[in-house]
């Protein structure tokens, strides 16, 4: 069968017609949807995975974090590979690897095998998010049109993570936890074919050099930091291993800053962080998605093991969050296009504060209406924050570095999820008594207070990132980036 493909003059995707560009946007969002839904759907399956494979609480955390850590570590490499070797090509490779990893996950017979297969999935996922955003950025060049497209992109991120528990719960109840991974395969195939038909090949005008040392340092930093947080409770916070990995994390991040500042074309361009909106977008992503990642982990255990809900019932309880996320994500995109980032960021911060404070009061007999409103507030917060994060990351950046800039924003989201799972889980599990997960409601109270503090941070950043000083730093940063830095 011959597949008809489309090309754009000179590889410039922005010259395609509006309908074609919208079809490209939909295809890119489809790829992100399966990556996001995989993160959140697996959370609902954790009790079933624990029962079937005999996984410990720490191993359950690693089922989530092995995926997000590898994804976060390789996203910037995936973005630069797309800019260098061809965005369409790398996008299709990512879909293939993600599908293979999903099959291996469904065949897992031990926690260790599942964790390893999740890492393979993440390698594929790292080639999807940043490359798709790079394609979108180069497809929609008008600032307002691009902001709306990014709003749809944000909706795909938010809705996929929000509906994941509902979809995952239905699959676990009806078929088994393996079905969550089976779902990815036909979607990957469909996205692969649509990419071949719709998306023309494009590259950055000039390929960036590879930075293997920077890549290794990023991986070491994220892996050692997360290992220390997750395993600290089991091994002991003062044990030689835990102290050693925290020291290694500190050394690696200092070395990363030194090494990247000395490279002409670094993997992580430190000049980006001179832009206050860009730096704020990174911090916002880490903070917001820490709250989301920690919530998804603890809430599913609370509902299923604390209150005796089935996986589907637990997923159904998150429906208010999913609906709010889906409704407010495109609203956020329009607000960013018409008024800027401050308004949606303020709404997001207030909503997360409200949700966190409400959750501090829950118990095993809390009204479902009360829980539903707390989940609704979190959905509003997460729906409103994605568009400002992504728009700030790519605004003011040269188009030939769109893949790297958007990859940093995507990396920040995954780092946030990893830290949320590690930190929120460590805080809650450390307070569990002999009653185990049945006491999770009371053990999690300090965790939800941390979530409320995350909302306060988002509120502060809403004003820091949107003032006149912040706007001046964007212009100055762009000038620095377009002038090649001389090696020291």
Image (spheres, grey):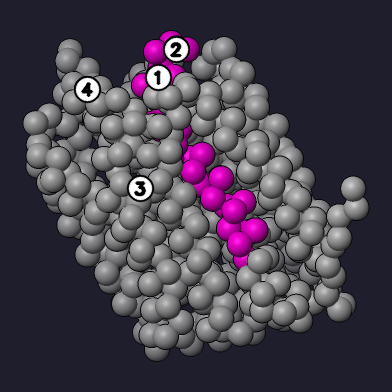
First in sequence: mark 1 or mark 3? 1
Binning the other alpha carbons within 10 Å of mark 3 as few (below 14), some (14 to 19) or many (20 upward) gives: many
- Residue, disc 3: 292
Most extreme residue toward the front is 1
* Whether label 2 touches label 1, CB < 8 Å: yes
Q: Residue at x 51, y 17 (%)?
A: 111
**Residue 52 numbered mark, or none:** 2
Against 279, residue 424 (above or below) is above
Q: Which dot marks residue 308?
A: 4
- Mark 4 touches mark 2? (CB < 8 Å): no
CA gap, disc 2 and disc 1: 6 Å
**Distance Cα–Cα, label 1 vs label 3:** 21 Å
- Quadrant where the image shows the C terminus: bottom right
Q: Position of residue 217 (x, y in %)?
A: 63, 44
Measure the C-alpha gap from mark 4 to mark 3: 22 Å
Prevailing secondary structure of the magenta residues: helix
Task: Tell me where residue 26 appears, x and y as whole percent.
Answer: 61, 62
Which residue is painted at 57% across and 77% down in the image? 146
Q: Is residue 360 visible?
A: no
Question: Residues in magenta?
Answer: 25-54
182 sits to left or right of 429: right
Q: CA distance from mark 4 to mark 2?
A: 17 Å
The relative height of residue 444 versus residue 357 in the rendered view (above or below) is above
List the single residue furthest toward the right. Answer: 2
* Dot 3: element: helix
Quarter of the image for residue 285 reads bottom left
């Amino acid at each position: 069968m011959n597949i008809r493909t489309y090309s754009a003059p000179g590889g410039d995707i922005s010259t395609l017609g509006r309908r074609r560009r919208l079809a490209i946007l939909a295809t890119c969002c489809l790829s992100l949807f399966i990556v996001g839904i995989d993160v959140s759907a697996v959370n609902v399956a954790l009790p079933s995975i624990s029962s079937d494979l005999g996984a410990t609480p720490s191993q359950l955390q690693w089922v989530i974090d092995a995926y997000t850590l590898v994804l976060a570590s390789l996203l910037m490499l995936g973005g630069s590979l797309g800019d260098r070797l061809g965005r369409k090509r790398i996008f299709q490779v990512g879909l293939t690897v993600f599908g293979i990893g999903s099959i291996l996950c469904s065949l897992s017979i031990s926690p260790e095998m599942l964790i390893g297969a999740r890492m393979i999935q993440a390698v594929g996922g790292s080639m999807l998010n940043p490359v798709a955003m790079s394609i979108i950025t180069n497809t929609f060049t008008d600032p307002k049109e691009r902001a709306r497209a990014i709003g749809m992109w944000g909706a795909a991120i938010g809705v996929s993570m929000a509906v994941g528990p509902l979809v995952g719960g239905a699959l676990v109840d009806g078929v088994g936890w393996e079905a969550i991974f089976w779902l990815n395969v036909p979607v990957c195939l469909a996205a692969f074919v649509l990419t071949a038909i719709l998306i023309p090949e494009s590259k950055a005008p000039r390929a960036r050099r590879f930075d293997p040392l920077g890549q290794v340092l990023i991986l070491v930093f994220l892996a050692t930091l997360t290992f220390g947080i997750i395993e600290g409770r089991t091994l002991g916070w003062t044990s030689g291993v835990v102290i050693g990995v925290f020291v290694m994390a500190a050394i690696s991040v200092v070395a990363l800053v030194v090494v990247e500042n000395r490279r002409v074309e670094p993997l992580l361009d430190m000049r980006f962080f001179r832009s206050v909106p860009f730096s704020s977008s990174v911090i916002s992503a880490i903070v917001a998605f820490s709250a989301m990642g920690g919530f998804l982990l603890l809430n599913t255990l609370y509902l299923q093991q604390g209150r005796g809900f089935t996986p589907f019932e637990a997923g159904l309880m998150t429906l208010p969050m999913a609906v709010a996320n889906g409704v407010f994500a495109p609203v956020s995109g329009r607000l960013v296009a018409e008024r800027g980032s401050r308004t949606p960021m303020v709404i997001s911060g207030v909503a997360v504060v409200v949700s966190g404070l409400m959750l501090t009061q829950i118990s095993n007999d809390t009204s479902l209406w009360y829980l539903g409103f707390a989940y609704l507030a979190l959905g509003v917060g997460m729906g409103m924050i994605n568009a400002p994060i992504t728009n700030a990351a790519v605004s003011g950046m040269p188009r030939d570095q769109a893949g790297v800039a958007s990859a940093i924003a995507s990396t920040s989201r995954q780092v946030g999820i990893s830290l949320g799972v590690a930190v929120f889980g460590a805080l809650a599990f450390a307070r569990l008594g002999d009653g185990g997960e049945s006491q999770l409601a009371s053990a999690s109270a300090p965790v939800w207070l941390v979530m409320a503090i995350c909302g306060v941070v988002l509120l502060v950043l809403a004003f820091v990132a949107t003032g006149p000083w912040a706007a001046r730093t964007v212009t100055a940063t762009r000038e620095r980036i377009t002038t090649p830095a001389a090696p020291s």
